[in-house]
Amino acid sequence: MRFTAGTTAKRKPVRLPLVGMIDVFFLLLVYFIVSTTLAIPEDELSAALRQQSEESASDLQPQFVEVLAQGGSVVFKVGGQQLGSQEDLRELLSQLPKEAGVFLQVDDAAPVWAAASALQACHDAGYEKLTYVTPE
Amino acid sequence: MKDESHVDSGFDMTPMIDVVMLLIIFFLVTSQFSQSIRTPLELPRQDGQQLENQDNSGDIVVDLLANGSIRLEGEELSMDSFIAMVGTEILHGDPNMEVLIRPDRSGPALHLNKLCAMLSESGVRAYRIATTPADWGAQ
């Protein structure tokens, strides 16, 4: 066997095309910067709508949660009990039967965040049927 | 005899990858922009719920400001004209359409109750409230 000196000399050096990779890298960088600064995440809470005057078709009585504004604070009322926090409301609701669902009514003077807080507590307690009842 | 002028006919993937990535990024960024068109509002800070298999593409997204005014796609309009628009949509469009309300967390529930009552009268059976995750930003 004979080795020629010219074989290795003719071999071209391997060149990695870096330009395209750099392009892609910068585009990805820009995308992630833009998307993290623009996108403020939003979640959602859903509820059925029903007016207080409508009659219930079911024999089961749903739980009834009221959100009341008392002075500068907010109170959640379930049956005869008044609760001061979302945690307490969630705790109580999770112990009650859930088949008939829950009705939620919010006092006009109560803030919107309290309504959302009560909605969240109802969902967290495991109620699937959640109806927002508007005052007459 | 070997042809010295032979040109390597290998397919150069780099420009194609560039174009594909550009298109992907374009669509991702535009989808982000379409969300960011939503007016910045102080939404209630709640974690929300897992909504399964929901197609919300046809739903109406409405901003409810603290003073009770309503904004639809950045334009302020009266509650009556909004309800009339929703009624028309239900009548001629999707009867199961839902409304996504983006309320200002500090406003009184009076306006939310009023809006919900009017929506219910116009035939809307359910609504959703937009929230900001509780752990987003400064508490």
Image (tube, rainbow, N blue to C red):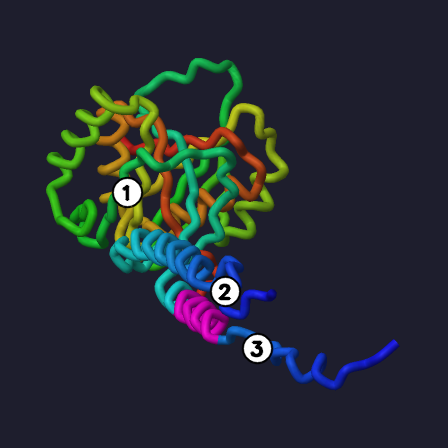
For the residues beneath circles 2 and 1, the answer to whether they share a chain is: yes
Along the line of sight, the residue nearer the viewer: A10 or A107: A10
What chain is tagged by disc 3? A
From the viewer's perspective, tell me whether residue A127 is left or right of residue A10: left
State the SS at label 1.
strand
What chain is tagged by disc 1? B
Q: Amino acid at mark 3?
A: Arg
Identified at 20% across, 47% down, the residue is B73
**Dot 1, how many residues are within 10 Å of its Cα: few (below 14), some (14-19), or many (20+)?**
many
Q: Nearer the viewer, mark 2 or mark 1?
A: 2
Residue B16 higher or lower than B85, as above or below:
below
State the SS at label 2.
loop
Identified at 19% across, 45% down, the residue is B72
Q: Quadrant of the C terminus of chain B?
A: bottom left
Residue A53 in the image, given as x and y percentages of width and height: 30, 21
The residue that label 2 is drawn on is B7
Q: Are marks 3 and 2 in contact (CB under 8 Å)?
A: no
The residue that label 3 is drawn on is A15
Q: Amino acid at mark 2?
A: Val
Query: How many angstroms separate mark 3 from mark 2 (CA)?
Result: 17 Å
For the residues beneath circles 3 and 2, the answer to whether they share a chain is: no
Q: Amino acid at mark 1?
A: Val
The residue that label 1 is drawn on is B61
**Magenta segment: does it hold A30?**
yes
**Residue extent of the magenta highlight:** A19-33
